[in-house]
Image (cartoon, coloured by chain):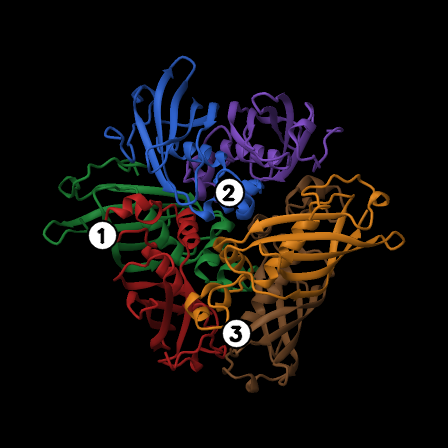
Chain colours: A orange, B brown, C green, D red, E blue, F purple
């Protein structure tokens, strides 16, 4: 993570954004994160809130919602301020390993392509745990709305 | 939505799942949903928590996180219980219209393909507001883990 | 409410508790109270989180969970500190009128009977809105556990 | 729990509801559940938020609010959708054993009586922990409001 | 803490308030307290939400926000009801020792000076952990606004 | 606010920090912010959660906790990352105007003094509403702990 700055000051114009610019955001996932996430979204799958059910399965314990990682991806992108942007969506969102309560997730958001004509920006996003294992990845598509 | 059941009883075997089965989940998005979502994910983009900033832009007011719709998509899938499943990810997640505080979002999750050999299931997911406008869509990929 | 004190200092012995002692607790019910309550308990009935569904029914808008009033009843009882007590339960819990977002609910908890031999205490509890209308009532039973 | 379905599809008419129909809802009670419940209801009794106080008492640790179990009871009832219903209240709510942080509570809601003339439905509700011990019980009374 | 009452009944007039009156409030700080506090205030410093970062530092683990102690100070003051008051601010707020998740904090609020002419009241406030160690202190200034 | 950057990249050494560097953080205060803040801190003063009580007073409506502004001050400071720092406290915290639900608060944190010998840093912090009115101010004292 040598070339990653935790917060990143960027000027307000699209022209100043460069491919390769990278932002990151790190958070230890708490039980309350998962429970509040269930409470907001309504996703009370036993994968997340039923410890007994999970004790009998392959993971052995409750795991975080994959979609919470998508939230972290958005949080990393929100650390960049280059004019007004809005997320258009994600491609190839993959949850590749379970995230357990207490895992520390570092989300890295790296600009991979800028289309000045269409005013769009593509970024590669990864979520990695405290052992350096990839837990989720995606491509984010943002538009410059002004 | 004539053929959509709010909750859906399904037996515990993959063999009983049929293409076309559909589940839905409806929730009015509150200011607290968006604020708590920001608080959990760390996404404090002014799009979501700065009413003055938004007053000057094209939307005129704060909007929900696109990624919150991904959470609703997971919640709809969690209403189906057919053995142990886990979400592998999403393809073509698109946020096609802004979701404003007070909008009532119906998320529909419809099984589109079942691959018994690979033990995978593909579903089309849509989020629609109270005026019937599509606000988000995606394809969800789930695996049967047992 | 002339003889009701908002907070009540009581000595630490059961013998000092008197029939007729009354405590109260007032809170305006917010949208976030109802949404967080749904999120903790898992009660996402459309009565509470689907504004469109409710627009078509007799209430015209989302209402608070009746069980939230039971929570307020416990909160009022918790303002009394007379040794260690624990709630044994409630009898005749009645939700007699809908509680709408923004209603200000005053919960009054009045000791109605003390059984020193059995170390039990019965209290009448009422929840009243800002127009003085009763919205909920119950009898609470507490035990002195030490 | 052989004859209990986690989610239950029921048609929209009262006439289709049968005595004996049963729904259930399972959740592991987290520290955040209890703390957020305190925060919403205002019940900051040391029983729930003061570990030192509890260390000296009979339970040895913080316990969940009894009234949280009433919330779980409502959540189980909300999984049944047969027309518009509203909870009229509860009878004989009993908190029979302490619920500790980390306990997994299964709430079962079973229809015990249907009064078509009065448009009312009575159900027996129980909360059981991961060791199969009953922790709470009650009778719920619902009305069909449309 | 012999002369501290947990809750304190005080009459509604400033003239009845006495120097030396003391109130207290005790709460075990949970992981969810710190995480929700981060979520509301937007303070996601790694001191509070990044366990790996903290493992390498002098504290060895995540700690609570110092400003959360200021919140507890206000909570203790809110237990006194003597007419309408409003907090004007704090002087010499000092965070003198780290508060770890699971620490039980007792906040004591003691009136130290009353200025009837200016309708102001000064109080000394301390936060102490379960080992009796001072973790925070301040002077609070309140005004009687009616 | 011409010379204020929303996020600020700073190198990891104390020597690179300059007097005059300024960070800011803007958030519209929601009803849920105030209610969740009450729920975490335990400060249920009617100033914040009782709309009827406030309707009769000078403010006419519920207001945010002053201490929430201290939380925003910490959030602004957390946007600067120059080695490991910890907040030692605040001096002259003043709540100079009420913050109402829906007010948009910009918190500015400006370094005013750096003491390399003592490894301490002093900053002036202000909270301003959407009309440019000062609502709170303080001096923050931070230490470099490594």
Dot 3 corresponds to which residue? B7
Mark 2 is surrounded, within 10 Å at the Cα level, by few (under 14), some (14 to 19) or many (20 or more) other residues, namely many
Mark 2–mark 1 distance (CA, rounded to whole Å) = 31 Å
Mark 3–mark 2 distance (CA, rounded to whole Å) = 35 Å
Q: Could you say whether the residue bearing mark 3 is in a helix, strand or loop?
A: loop
- Callouts 3 and 1 in the same chain: no
Q: Is residue C58 visible?
A: no
Q: In the shown orientation, is residue A24 left or right of residue A46?
A: right
Q: In the shown orientation, is residue B115 left or right of residue C74?
A: right
Q: In the shown orientation, is residue C102 left or right of residue B4?
A: left
Using the image, determine if residue F104 lies above or below residue B123: above
Q: Position of residue C136 (x, y in %)?
A: 35, 54
- Callouts 3 and 2 in the same chain: no
Dot 1 corresponds to which residue? D58
Mark 3–mark 1 distance (CA, rounded to whole Å) = 42 Å
Residue located farthest toward the top when viewing the structure as drawn:
E117
Q: Of the numbered discs in the image, which one, if any, rests on residue E89? A: none
Q: Nearer the viewer, mark 3 or mark 1?
A: 1
Q: Residue at x 36, y 75 (%)?
A: D110
Q: Position of residue E51 (x, y in %)?
A: 52, 47
Dot 2 corresponds to which residue? E37
């Amino acid at each position: 993570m040598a070339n990653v700055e935790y917060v990143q000051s960027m000027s307000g114009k699209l022209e100043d954004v460069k491919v390769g610019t990278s932002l990151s955001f790190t958070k230890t996932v708490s039980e309350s994160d998962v429970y509040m996430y269930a409470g907001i979204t309504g996703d009370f799958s036993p994968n997340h809130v039923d410890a007994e059910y999970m004790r009998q399965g392959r993971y052995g314990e409750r795991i975080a919602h994959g979609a919470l990682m998508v939230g972290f991806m958005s949080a990393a992108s929100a650390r960049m301020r280059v004019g007004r942007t809005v997320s258009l969506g994600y491609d190839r969102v993959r949850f590749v390993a379970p995230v357990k309560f207490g895992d520390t997730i570092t989300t890295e958001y790296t600009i991979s392509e800028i289309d000045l004509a269409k005013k769009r920006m593509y970024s590669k996003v990864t979520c990695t745990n405290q052992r350096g294992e990839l837990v989720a990845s995606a491509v984010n598509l943002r538009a410059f709305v002004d």
